Amino acid sequence: MLGSLFSPTGLAPARRRRILAAALAAAGSLAGVPLAAQPSPEAAHAIAPANQDAAAAARRGISAYLASHYSDALPDLEAARAGGAADGSVLYMLAYCYQAARLDASLAARAWDEALETLTKEVAASGPSLDSWFYLSNLHLSRQDEANSRKTAEAGVAAIDARRTRVGKDGVSLFRAGKVHADAGRTKEAVAFHKRALSAFAKPAGNPPPEYLRRAAETLVRYEPESLDHEKVFRTWERLLASDPGIINGDWHLGIAALRAGRYEQARDAFERIRKAGGTAAQDAFYTSSLASACAGLVARGIRIPQYDAKKRKIVALPQEEIDTDIAEVAKKASGILSRPVTPADYLISVGPKGKKRIGPGPALQKEMDDTRAALAARAIVLASRGESLQAKAFEGGYAALLIQDWTRMWQNAHRELIETLNPPQEVAEPAGSEG
């Protein structure tokens, strides 16, 4: 966005670098400088006096745009263009503001065309900026042109790899680099950049644009880098929803982040809010809420949700086909455990304070059931975090009851005849003198 701002053709490289530093500082993307920061005296001197007002307008417009204040950004972005201080990225922002804030499709279309022409020239120049690649790829996507978006992003990745395009260490630059890699289909690298962006945003002076923070956090909810700090992602979503409870799908992302962080009670609460709100996501929320409740119960009984399979491979890294196969095998095993004939060693009779008997699984059987349910839960968490519908997958695989029902009650229902034999219903005596 800012790589070529205040860089009219003919300026010497050193001068362009001074101007760029001022623009980046004003946008809060260098070492966490606040968005409202003013350019240094050196940078202010480098800007031609005739363009001072337009440059200041560009800085204000960029700051407002990054804060998602599109109506506030619009007049300053217009002033920047009128004063000759708008590069392709600023023109992109202007087009977006015409579309999102003013709802003027005609003005937006003309600004998109102008941004497209300018950004195309910028990426064709020597040493194109990361911001030009980022906004050009986004522009193609905004026009539903995925082929040209991917082509642009692939060229941007190649420029980054060849070090013709620099990626800064600030959160904004790292986020944009991740987005370019994502648009190019380079998911692993995109996740790595967004992980670094989230760390940069978390610093006291990180000053993240709200939309960038949300998008980076979404990426890390969906994917599984080896060294991801799930607790940090969960805390990020807590912070995001505390500041803006209306974030689209916010509770869902919070719930998934909580599941992956082992915060099962918080996950259940998030999914329950979705379920109670109704709508198209309510049924899936019921399944994920049931999953979270089961995990919370297992952990309360001292059972760990496994991270590795029998071959010592990380479950989260297993391909989808293996996850589905594993779940089918675990579900078959669970059905066998719950329905097989029992021996006296398999059940435990306890007596309540009022003398009422309760018959449930014995310690060894309960441990076998818990371990099997934990194995199922570990794989179901992966399905949910990958965006799969647990409801649809469970019905398709025939294991819906195993996800949403209490296994002890399922065992008791499967052995109702035995339980009634061991604990026959009490006959109710007729009141004295009831005969005619």
Image: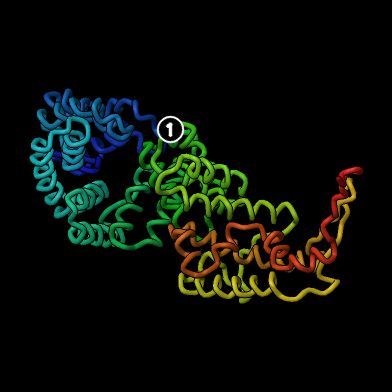
User: Where residue 154 appears, x then y in whole percent?
Assistant: 25, 62
- Tell me which corner region of the image, top left, top right, bottom left or bottom right, holds residue 109: top left
Asked if residue 223 lies left or right of residue 427, the reply is: left
Q: Amino acid at mark 1?
A: Asp
Image quadrant where one finds the C terminus: top right
Residue sitting at x 27%, y 29%? 42
- Is 325 rendered above or below residue 290? below
- Is 7 rendered above or below residue 340? above
Q: Nearer the viewer, residue 281 or 261?
A: 281
Asked if residue 18 lies left or right of residue 91, the reply is: right
Q: Nearer the viewer, residue 310 or 21?
A: 310
Q: Nearer the viewer, residue 205 or 419?
A: 419
Q: Nearer the viewer, residue 81 or 92?
A: 92
Is residue 257 among the parts visible in the rendering?
yes
User: Where residue 110 appears, x then y in whole percent?
Assistant: 8, 40
Asked if residue 322 lies left or right of residue 249, the reply is: right
Image quadrant where one finds the N terminus: top left
User: Where residue 361 appears, x then y in whole percent?
Assistant: 78, 64
- Is 408 rendered above or below residue 321? above
Is residue 10 among the parts visible in the rendering?
no
| Residue position for label 1 | 244
Name of the residue lying farthest toward the front: 436
Q: Secondary structure at mark 1?
A: loop
Asked if residue 320 lies left or right of residue 168, the reply is: right
Residue sitting at x 46%, y 31%? 243
- Is 224 rendered above or below residue 340? above
Residue sitting at x 23%, y 27%? 71
User: Where residue 356 appears, x then y in whole percent?
Assistant: 86, 51
Residue sitting at x 40%, y 48%? 280
